[in-house]
Amino acid sequence: MNRTRLGAGRYIDAAEAPSNTVTSTHELTTADGAKVSGVLRTVPGAETVVALMHPRQDLTHHVLVPELLARGYAVWTQGTRSVNNDISLVHEQALLDAAAGQVFLRSRAFDHVVTLGHSGGGTLFAFYCEQAGLTPEERLAATPAGRPIDLASAEMPVPDGAIFMAPHPGQGALLLRLIDPSVVDESDPMSVDPALDPFDSANGFVEAPESSNYSADFVQKYRAAQLERVARLDAIARSRVAEASEARRRFKTSGDAHDRRDALAPRILTVYRTDADLRFTDLSLSSNARPYGSLFGRRPDLTNYGLVGFARLATPDAWLSTWSGLSSNADFVRCAPSVTVPSLFVELTGDQACFPEDTSRMVEALGSVDKSHVAIEGTHFGGPIRDGAPTGASLAAADIGDWLSQHFI
């Protein structure tokens, strides 16, 4: 692996699938009429299928796929309607996407269906389990932006087991620690309040690869300012939702095409600088075995200003449903008490998104009386903890395989 590249470490090479793997692709229709697709891989004798899904990413070639197949399990990898283009990702809609996959797998006559949520997939499946476990009339009827969502009429089978590998606390909860609060003008990507700049040596920053050293006072001030910025963005999003709602109201009265166009205008939020968790550069905070840097590369002082990152562009609905740590329903700790099926939580000791205190809260919150927690050497995406070490994915696969064989035979 070339570790000198700015974004090194995000992609892990997978092993070859067993030669007797049978692969089929499937298009599914969700309860609200959307189309989603998935890939089913199975091997002779597979009686348990493991479903991998992420709200934003294509997991077709996830590193665990061949590992699970080699251990005799079928694997289902599925996308949402927003895969690889999350500008309009609404988590409540993603639940309908997940439900379509779960219904499909039940129709294939597997003995057991087990979900596996890696990273953001963990919260997606925790949220799914919460809503699937409710009676239809108890399920959410609207998104945080007020958009009606018909979960009540959807068939939502509860899985037989749930595996969580390096799950972060939720897209919004994660961003609440990543967002740069030194932005003073949401229309200017270079606007900076020096007193809150995480990459200013006056505040304790030290250039890579040395660890920075932020004071407790700065950390406290920084975290409070992050909350304030998210609240500010929430207010902007809600004002834009209100503008669109008012335009729809006018159109119902006027029938004017101008009002209709005004209602349809997307009012996209541009959210600058969202790769600035202090823990990326100060390794003494939430200490674990992680390397210096963020999920997006070894130089967060640079990637924070770049195009690639969380929530860079979002509709107001998507911001409130997915990216706001103050408004999103998709929060792991909130949803976890409803995960009552047998559960395995795989912690990666060099994780850059799920930190030790996050792990403790999430494992404790899981509602299952049959829950296991294992700690594996590796980084968030399943890479090795150091050069020459086994990948975290291969180590995790061994524990996942053992757990599956103990629970679903």
Image: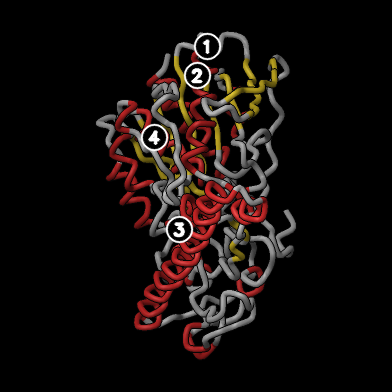
Q: Nearer the viewer, residue 338 or 241?
A: 241
Indicate the amino acid at tag 1.
Ser
- Give the residue at mark 2: 103
3D distance between C-alphas at marks 4 and 1: 25 Å
- Residue 107, numbered circle: 1
Callouts 2 and 1 close, C-beta under 8 Å: yes
3D distance between C-alphas at marks 2 and 1: 6 Å
Position of 376 relative to 202 (above/below): above
Residue positioned 61% across, 75% down in the render: 187
Position of 276 relative to 74 (above/below): below
Position of 120 relative to 340 (above/below): below
Q: Residues within 10 Å of mark 4 (few under 14, many from 20)?
A: many
Position of 21 relative to 306 (above/below): above
Indicate the amino acid at tag 4.
Leu
Residue 122, percent from left and from top: 46, 41
Indicate the amino acid at tag 2.
Val
Q: Earlier in the sequence, mark 2 or mark 4?
A: 2
Q: Quadrant of residue 223?
A: bottom left
Q: Earlier in the sequence, mark 3 or mark 1?
A: 1
- Residue 324, numbered circle: 3
Nearer to us: label 3 or label 1: 3
Q: Secondary structure at mark 1?
A: helix
